[in-house]
Image: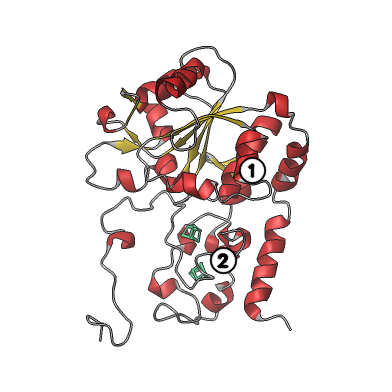
Amino acid sequence: MINRRDFLKLAACLGASLPIAGFPSAVKAALKTIDPKSVPKLIYLQAQSCTGCSVSLLQAEAPGAVSMITQYSKLVYHQDLSAASGKQVLDLMNAYISGNAGDYFLAVEGSIPLGMPDACVIGGKPIADYLSAAARTMSGAVAIGTCSSYGGIPAAEGNLTGAVSLNDFYKAINKKPLLISIPGCPVHPDWVWKTIVHLVKIGLPELTDTRPAAFFSRKVHELCPRYHDFQQEIFAEKLGDQGCLFKIGCLGPDTFADCPTRWWNSGQTWCIDANAPCIGCASPMFARKKDFPFYRNAEIVIPGIPGEKS
Ligand code: SF4
Ligand code: SF4
């Protein structure tokens, strides 16, 4: 006998495997046509980031991360993953960014310190210099995660570095490269790898503003398995309760992402399945204002814990 949780999980897996606007099936077909001898080159830069998106990308499966960066693309540069180091790897990266080594796509994780360029340097040079040079030479750029897509935590109110998204950085220097934003804190590996394969093998995917529409055209709230509870006004009063999490701060109604059908951690769970409200990590407003709930002290509501609210 299948229980409710297993049923929801099964439904989510089936939902994630269904083509959304033709995107996943097109990507699957594209993967079969990739010629290992002429795979796209990828340069991955980390700006003001915590490296969480890179860690999340390593959780990719079918194909896994190793296949993605060796068989289906060639990772030319990544601060954590490059086998080469020091001058050798910087020269290699510069041969693409500032030279004419060939076609490549740029992936950028983290926000750009527009007001304080020295806050983020690679090989002694501000990342802004590399990004500016790349605007001339790259085939396109992908902003990885919420910091790169919208500013995120480094761009929170009161930050000293003038942190901006990749899109806003290019607007500030009057450049208009092909750019796709893939938010999420961290980003989901499917959102990134499927977008990159689409971009290099099929072309620009359908976008909603600068995000891939296949993943970001519907709200978490619309797809949520607890939407029925919301309609019936069955609300959780505290963490761990059953029911819609709206009254304990769920931001699913304001957040565009397909987490309820895609799930996380290889389809094991996702925020609301784990009884945690959606904190809007893929939304432009995530962690920007100092009164955003993310920064508030936890309101302790567990009976018996000191500080419990009465
Ligand atoms: S738990 Fe959140 S996303 Fe789900 S129905 Fe309630 S408010 Fe919407
Ligand atoms: S459910 Fe919300 S907080 Fe959780 S990963 Fe998706 S967008 Fe982010």
Location of residue 130 (image quadrant)? top left
Q: Which residue is nearer to you in this view: 146 or 190?
A: 190
**What residue is shown at x 25% (from left), y 87% (from top)?**
310
Res 205 visible = no
Q: Which quadrant would the N terminus be assigned to in this image? A: bottom right
**What residue is shown at x 67% (from left), y 28% (from top)?**
39
Residue at the spot of label 2: 269
Q: Which residue is nearer to you in this view: 226 or 121?
A: 121
Question: Compared to 238, does 219 lie above or below?
Answer: above
Location of residue 267 (image quadrant)? bottom right
Residue at the spot of label 1: 194
Label 2: few (<14), some or many (≥20) within 10 Å? some
Label 1: few (<14), some or many (≥20) within 10 Å? some
Which disc number belongs to residue 77?
A: none
x, y (%) of residue 216?
56, 50
Q: CA distance from mark 1 to mark 2?
A: 20 Å
